[in-house]
Image (tube, grey):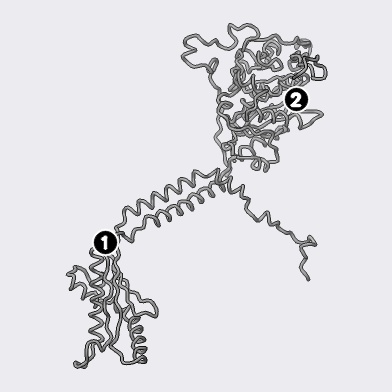
Amino acid sequence: MSSPSPASGAGPSTPLVSRVIDIRVVLGLLRSYWPGLVVGVLLGAAAAYVYTATQPKIYAADASGIVTTGPTSGAGEASVADQVAKSRAASYVPLATSRSVAARVIDKLHLDTSPAALVGQITASNDDGTVLIDISAVSSSPSQAKQLADAWIEALAAEIKRIEAPTDTTAAAEDYVHLEPVESAELPTAPISPSPKRNELLGVMAGLVLGAGYGFVRFRLDRRIHGSSDVAAYGVTVAGVIPLNSAFAKRRGVSVESARDLRADSGAPGEAIRKLRTNLQFMDIDDPPRTIVVTSPLPGDGKSTVAANLAVALSASERPVVIIDADLRRPVQADSFGLAEGAGLTDVLIGRATFEQVAQRPAQHPALIVLAAGRVPPNPSELLGSRTMGKLLAQLADTYTVVVDAPPLLPVTDAAVLTANADGALIVLSAGSSLDVQLGEAIGNVRAVNGHVLGVVLNKVKRGVKSGYYGYSYDYAPASAGRSAPLWRRLAGLVRRPGRGLRPGESGALLPLPAFETSRTETSRTETSRTEPARIESARIEAPARPSRPPSPANRPPGPPRR
């Protein structure tokens, strides 16, 4: 059977691009884990420096001699003598490192060592095809290395003379093969070991390998959410990406200045919030989400900041906006907008007040209404999951775009319950801190109550890049009115508490809201055995009048001609 050809499509083929490492991925890893590389290089260089400093210095000295034969009478004899000398030179190399030669050197220099130990300091060599023998001696002292090399070449010459001396006493000394020293050793000026440059290079290379290994292990074991690709594995989209900005994140909500300038702000956080608003509006052009729950897996991910700024951005559209602080354990929205922290959502849910009595409008945002959390109840989950809360959200959605600042999903069930009565939830993640398993659990909690995840907002994104039980904790926070001002100003009475002593129109003052068309039906429990849940007042509110826009260029009265 013939194998299928690639063109037939019977066999899978891997594109070449998929087998090539994307240079952007490599650069991204380097950008993410460069501190590990730097630390590895520094550790390697430091280890090399310490090793070099602790090793003894070794000096080397070289001496050489030439193997010669007796005089010759003709060219033929000279050629034969040269071959004999070369052969002898090669055979004398093992002799040069013998104990007999070492014993001669010990006797001459009066050394207190053994021949075997002294031989370890000597290296003998002979280049092929030459009659030259090189002796290299090493020692911890430059002068000792020089003396040892010179003494060794002389001792080798003496040993060769003893071996090669003819038995015929009448023969002349120059008639036999002998070694003649030709170059004495020079006093070494620099040690050959340790080599600082070589050791530093090896240390840096080892540090790079160590740092790269650390980065690879961190990359393989990293469960944090860094980008859109980490979110896509859970079947949800990234609705917005908000860059890390200290001015944007220094408060849980928006300050008066940042909230007022958000619509015209050209900075990165402001542009990111506007993109988030646009993405929400274009999720369904015909029927965009009107009730949006903003939550997060854990506290500290920035959900309240995102909710407040999203509400401000949405208020720039034609539809008025209500932001509800449903984080009853840690309410922050009233303080963020500089409003009173008195009655609020809990009072509406238990029937103690109506919506129009407790809703507040910041002076800087005529189209934005803030419903604070109100008094902290002992049973937040029951209140937020009640039918009354569902009716309130449904009635407000008829007129307003409702943004709900909900508690985190993992510590408590409040946010999951709220998503069942909303169009969907935005899950805010802290890039580089939130774990993928936390995102999976958060999405599972929303879908467990038939809720819908609109998308994920990656917050605190830096500009550039085994699951288990987590001990989540989420408790009540102490009252924090006026915490935004320095302590010395509050003690001096220079800062008024939010909502006190303010005239209508000032920051934190209650502004008049449009009148409600209310209807309440009460059923007497004594006349019927059937009980009905308490009905809230309908929230059919007339949209507040928006500031008049300047006339378009086509309808603008003509002015003086431009020059």
**Residue 536 image-quadrant placement:** top right
> Could you tell me if the residues under marks 2 and 1 are in contact, i.e. CB atoms within 8 Å?
no
Residue density around tag 1, few if under 14, some if 14–19, many if 20 or more, within 10 Å: some
The residue at which mark 2 appears reads as 290
Q: Secondary structure at mark 1?
A: loop
Q: Residue at x 80, y 28 (%)?
A: 287
Residue 91 position in % (x across, y down)? 33, 82
Looking at the picture, does residue 24 appear above or below residue 357? below
Real-space CA distance between mark 2 and mark 1, rounded to the nearest whole angstrom: 85 Å
**Is residue 472 visible to us here?**
yes
Q: Secondary structure at mark 2?
A: loop
**Residue 313 image-quadrant placement:** top right
In the image, 550: left or right of 24? right
Residue 316 position in % (x across, y down)? 72, 21
**Label 2 sits on what residue type?**
Arg
Q: Residue at x 32, y 52 (%)?
A: 53
